[in-house]
Every structure is written in structure tokens, then in C-alpha cells.
Amino acid sequence: MPAAESGVKSESEQGFVYLPLIAGWLVPGAGHFLLRKWYRGALLAASIVGMFAMGIVMQGKLHTNPHDILDILSLAGDLGNGLLYVVSRIAGLGAEHVQVTTADYGTRFIVVAGLLNVIAAVDAHNLRTGRKS
Amino acid sequence: MTHFAAVLLFALFASTVFGITQRETPQRMVRYGAYCFVLFAGSAIALSWLMFLIAR
């Protein structure tokens, strides 16, 4: 008799179902690490942290006080970085104003890193629920 | 860092995440990631040439 029919739950079916989603959002790749997807988690973490770090190095702006709809959308993207955003804000990283062309690129790098992190966290959730193998 | 290097880095990072999250098997992840990378970088080069020709 299969394990599912006998009522025995596999390891991935136990515990809080949203834990990989939340962990993956807070720390890039952590959701996959929780599910023992080591290589996927490491590649995702390297890509997302790398993109965020490049954005900071290029003097990209971390959005704080949104004044219009584009700023609000950019802030939402920034918040996708989870603890990276919080730690960077506390450490005072990121430029206050965009003054050079590369800083504009850096700002986009930071926003896109946040959006990619959300995609990765949702992927971890799908792995956790069995929607993806 | 040059603008083209920034484009290549952006394409590399984004296509890595797309490949891992949008496909299920490792082989298909690599193929889809490479496909996305070529599309990102290729479209940036094509649009750059288009803007160069328009500006002349």
C-alpha cells in the first residue's frame, strides 16, 4: 500500500506549510535549503544576493518614502529582498538620490533582485506543497 | 563597469532564477536558463543597434 494511502505523511508534508515561503522571502535561497534542495538554493542565493550587491555597488537607491505610484511599486520590489533590504537600510547602504547613470541601473538591479526573490520563495512553496517536484 | 557588462550580469542572474524556478528537471533548467540568457542579451544588443541606427 502506498505511503499516502496508509496515512503516513512524507517528511515534506509535515510542519508549517508556509515556512519555506516565508524563509525564502526573508533570506534568499533559505526556502530551498529547508527542503534540502541544496544546489538550487545555493544558485538562487548567489544570483539574488549577487544582483542586490551589484545594485548597491552601483550606488543604486533603496526606496524609503514613496511619493508616486512608481515609487510605491519600486518600494514593493525592494521589500521583496526581505532581510537584505532591512539590513541595508540599517547599515545606511544605497544612495539617497540617483546622480549617475550606473546608479539608475543599480536601482533597477535592487528592485529586480527583490522580484526574483519573490519568484524563488513561491517556487519553494510549490515544492513544499507538492505542486512542483 | 560598462553598460554591456551590466546587461550581461543582469541576464546571467535573472536567467539563472528563471531556469531553476520555471522548469522541473536539471537538464531542462539549464536549457531554459540558457534560452533566457540568449533572449536577454540578444534583445539588448538588437535594441541597441536599432537605437543607434535611428539616432543617425
Image (cartoon, grey):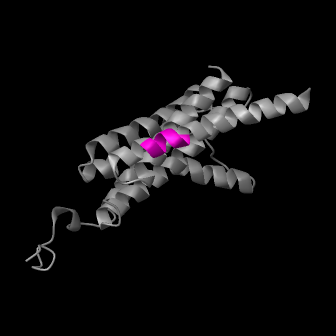
- Main SS category, magenta section: helix
Q: Residue at the spot x=36%, y=54% of the render?
A: B24
Q: Residue at the spot x=62%, y=19% of the render?
A: B1
Residue A92 x/y as whole percent? 54, 33
Q: Residue at the spot x=59%, y=44% of the render?
A: A111
Front position in the image: A19 or B51: B51
Left or right of A17 in this view: B34? right
Residue B32 magenta-highlighted = yes
Q: Residue at the spot x=41%, y=53% of the render?
A: B23
Q: Which residue occupies the extreme right position in the image?
A: B56
Examine the image and state in which quarter residue B9 appears: top right
Figure label count: 0
Residue A67 x/y as whole percent? 74, 52
Magenta stretch bounds? B31-36
- Identify whether A102 is placed above or below A35: above
Taking the image as drawn, is residue A69 in sight?
Answer: yes
Residue A2 x/y as whole percent? 11, 74
Residue A76 magenta-highlighted = no
Examine the image and state in which quarter residue A106 appears: top right
Left or right of B5 in this view: B51? right
Residue A116 x/y as whole percent? 50, 48
- In the rendered image, the quadrant that contains the C terminus of chain A is bottom left
